Image: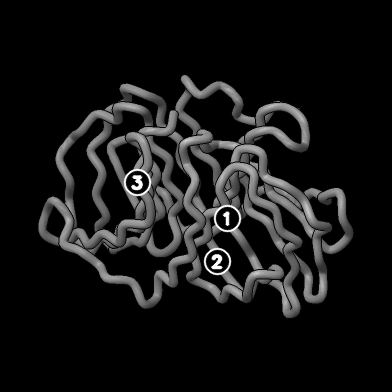
Amino acid sequence: MQINADLQKRVVVDSNALSWLPSPLPGVERRPLERMGVESGRATSIVRYAAGSSFKAHMHPLGEEILVLQGTFADEHGSYPAGTWLKNPPGSQHAPSSPDGCLLFVKLCHMTEADTNTECIDTLQGQWQPGQVEGLSVLPLDSVEGTHTALVRWAPGTHFSAHRHMGGEEILVLEGVFQDENGTYPAGTWIRSPHGSVHQPFSETGALIYVKVGHL
């Protein structure tokens, strides 16, 4: 299955408008944002676990990244409430579940073998740093070989200068409304901008976004 598989094209998806599709196991559904190939290939999705559902133990040949959006996610290593960011490196394995149900943002098979660290960050307790312009706050999550991942909070009325995305940029709007000269993006919007693309972002009402750059 190929979904938004051309990384040279800019893609904007309202994840809230997508239909839920079944996964291989009952109780786990997905809204696919991008997919390259078979079930084990590169993919980005919104994933929903019904209360009490679980997934069989499986390996991540090229890693997995999870941001818990709602509820509590769990595996044999621990329980992860909303706001937790997880990175399981290439070759890792786990058996995930959710006792009470949860909603996740999940990226699969997008890492390199050099990305060897396991990470678990409670973003609700994280140390935010000032951004490059007044009104921006940044919570760094990860940085490996030119790929950088962070949460970025935009105060109302914040504007950023036009800039080019070397290696591309991926955004999931978590709260509020994010904007640029191309459009307005409410919470739930996923944006993938290709290598070399340019935009001038801002937020009139304020926003919280997940951002990954340099991986495309």
Q: Which residue is mark 2?
A: 69
Sequence-wise, which precedes: disc 1 or disc 2?
Answer: 2
Question: Mark number for residue 105?
Answer: 1
Residue 151 picture location, percent across and down = 35, 58
Q: CA distance from mark 1 to mark 2?
A: 7 Å
Name the front one of labels 3 and 1.
3
Q: Amino acid at mark 3?
A: Ser
Q: Is residue 107 above or below residue 135?
A: above
Residue sitting farthest toward the left: 134
Q: Which residue is mark 3?
A: 143
Q: Which quarter shows the C terminus?
A: top left
Q: Decide: few, some or many residues near mark 3? Use Cα within 10 Å; few <14, some 14-19, many ≥20.
A: some
Sequence-wise, which precedes: disc 3 or disc 2?
Answer: 2
Sequence-wise, which precedes: disc 3 or disc 1?
Answer: 1
Q: Amino acid at mark 2?
A: Leu
Question: Which residue is painted at 62% across and 76% down in the image?
Answer: 79
